Image (cartoon, helix red, strand yellow):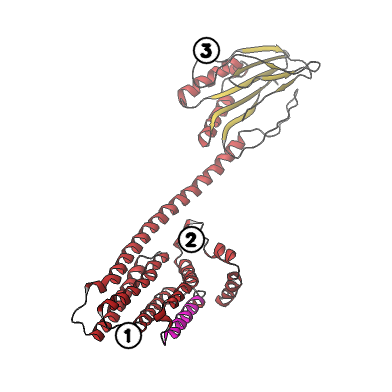
């Protein structure tokens, strides 16, 4: 898209101020604050919008009655329009800004000088001199370019031009020396330089910090995506297990947690069902859950057929390796050969059991949270017959 087309689109957007400001001054990403070309473009366009405030000087009777005041303000308008048009070609924007500033400051000072040329006394000269304070707004406005030298350059030009015009007026009045009061605008220009430059330094430092935080945030987000994938891999896929039929209802949360379930399939055809919930959320909980999954899958055979001893093993491991983490868990061992169900519950919501001909009920058992090493055994072991069409519900509370 050529710069002429971009300017045409700008004109259509400019008719809708809300759309214009939302698109033109959208610096939501920290990296965009480092694009000096874009910042200069936004600066020029904002300056064009704000330059209309200069025409408020027409409210001053002396300016309004000036013979060439309209000419000067007209040239200022043309300079701003030219700068606006040139902002779309994305080159030499610094020159466009600096040259425009020099021309506008010179024309404004010349306007003030000619408007008050009839003053012939020192008191009136002091009043005339105070109007030069209006230039300080142009100096301080340069800080929006976020360049350290902008306020200094514009302020220096303003000081030199002000001294030049005051010198002319001093010679017209025949004064031998400069009254100190005449340097008040120059002092204000210096203050604007200091304030503007300091603000730019602070803002650029904040932008640098924000950029670092933004980069760190992206790394964290990538780590969270990987951790989320790790957590999802903790859950088994759809398995076909002889002797049981199961359904899983799981609402995947937005956060990463330490909950998972797994099937422990033994060589003789018996099956264990393990469900745990590591306390807390985040990557650490997910990693602890991964360690628990490894413990369950690699522990000795004798523990897999003995739920209470399995819980003791996990309790000891968590207590020794992860003292600041704890978990609730429930493990059920289905012995299809002897037709028995054996399970232990370590601080988890009660198992819900329902036989084919009876109502559902909670199987109340005693058991403590894993990871504290509170007692031995950590969870009571319960055994009852395995009847065809029995139903069991494991619940994990969010």
- Report how far apart the C-alphas of labels 2 and 3 lie in the structure: 60 Å
- Eye-nearest disc, 1 or 3: 1
- CB atoms at circles 1 and 3 under 8 Å apart? no
Q: Secondary structure at mark 3?
A: loop
**Residue 390's mark?**
none
Q: Quadrant of residue 119?
A: bottom left
Residue at 28% in and 81% down: 164
In the rendered image, which residue does mark 2 sit on?
Answer: 32
- Report how far apart the C-alphas of labels 1 and 2 lie in the structure: 51 Å
Q: Of callouts 1 and 2, which one flags the residue occurring earlier in the amino acid sequence?
A: 2
- Eye-nearest disc, 2 or 3: 2
Mark 1 packing: few (<14 Cα in 10 Å), some, or many (20+)? Answer: few
The quadrant of the image that shows the C terminus is top right
Q: Of callouts 1 and 3, which one flags the residue occurring earlier in the amino acid sequence?
A: 1
In the rendered image, which residue does mark 1 sit on?
Answer: 118
Relative horizontal placement of residue 175, taking residue 374 as reference (left or right)? left
- CB atoms at circles 1 and 2 under 8 Å apart? no
The quadrant of the image that shows the N terminus is bottom right
Residue at 29% in and 78% down: 124
Q: Secondary structure at mark 2?
A: helix
Furthest-bottom residue in view? 67
Residue 9 at x, y = what percent? 60, 72
**Which residues lie in the magenta part?**
67-84
């Amino acid at each position: 898209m050529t710069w002429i087309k971009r300017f045409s689109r700008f004109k259509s957007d400019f008719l809708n101020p809300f759309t214009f400001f939302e698109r033109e001054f959208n610096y939501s990403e920290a990296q965009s604050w480092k694009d000096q070309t874009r910042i200069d473009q936004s600066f020029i366009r904002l300056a064009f919008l704000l330059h209309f405030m200069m025409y408020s000087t027409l409210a001053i009777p002396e300016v309004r009655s000036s013979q060439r005041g309209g000419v000067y303000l007209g040239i200022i308008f043309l300079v701003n329009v030219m700068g606006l048009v040139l902002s779309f070609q994305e080159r030499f924007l610094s020159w466009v800004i600096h040259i425009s500033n020099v021309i506008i400051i010179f024309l404004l000072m010349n306007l003030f000088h000619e408007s008050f040329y009839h003053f012939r006394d020192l008191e009136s000269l002091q009043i005339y001199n105070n109007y030069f304070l209006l230039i300080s707004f142009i100096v301080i406005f340069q800080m929006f370019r976020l360049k350290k030298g902008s306020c200094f350059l514009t302020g220096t030009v303003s000081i030199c031009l002000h001294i030049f015009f005051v010198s002319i007026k001093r010679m017209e009045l025949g004064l031998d020396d400069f009254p100190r009061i005449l340097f008040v605008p120059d002092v204000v220009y210096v203050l604007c330089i200091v304030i503007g430059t300091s603000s730019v330094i602070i803002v650029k430092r904040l932008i640098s910090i924000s950029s670092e935080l933004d980069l760190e945030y992206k790394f964290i987000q990538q780590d969270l995506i990987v951790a989320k994938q790790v957590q999802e891999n903790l859950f088994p896929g759809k398995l076909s297990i002889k002797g049981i039929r199961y359904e899983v209802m799981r609402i995947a949360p937005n956060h990463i947690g330490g909950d998972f379930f797994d099937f422990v399939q033994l060589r003789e055809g018996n099956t264990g069902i393990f469900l745990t919930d590591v306390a807390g959320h985040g990557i650490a909980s997910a990693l602890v859950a991964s360690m628990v999954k490894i413990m369950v899958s690699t522990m000795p055979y004798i523990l897999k057929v003995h739920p209470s001893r399995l819980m003791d093993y996990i309790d000891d491991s968590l207590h020794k390796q992860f003292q600041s983490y704890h978990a609730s868990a429930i493990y059920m061992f289905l012995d299809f050969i002897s037709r028995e169900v054996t399970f232990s519950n370590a601080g988890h919501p009660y198992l819900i059991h329902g036989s084919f001909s009876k109502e559902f009920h909670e199987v109340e058992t005693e058991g403590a949270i894993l990871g504290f090493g509170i007692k031995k055994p950590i969870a009571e072991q319960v055994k009852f017959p395995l009847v065809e069409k029995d139903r069991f519900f494991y619940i994990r509370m969010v």
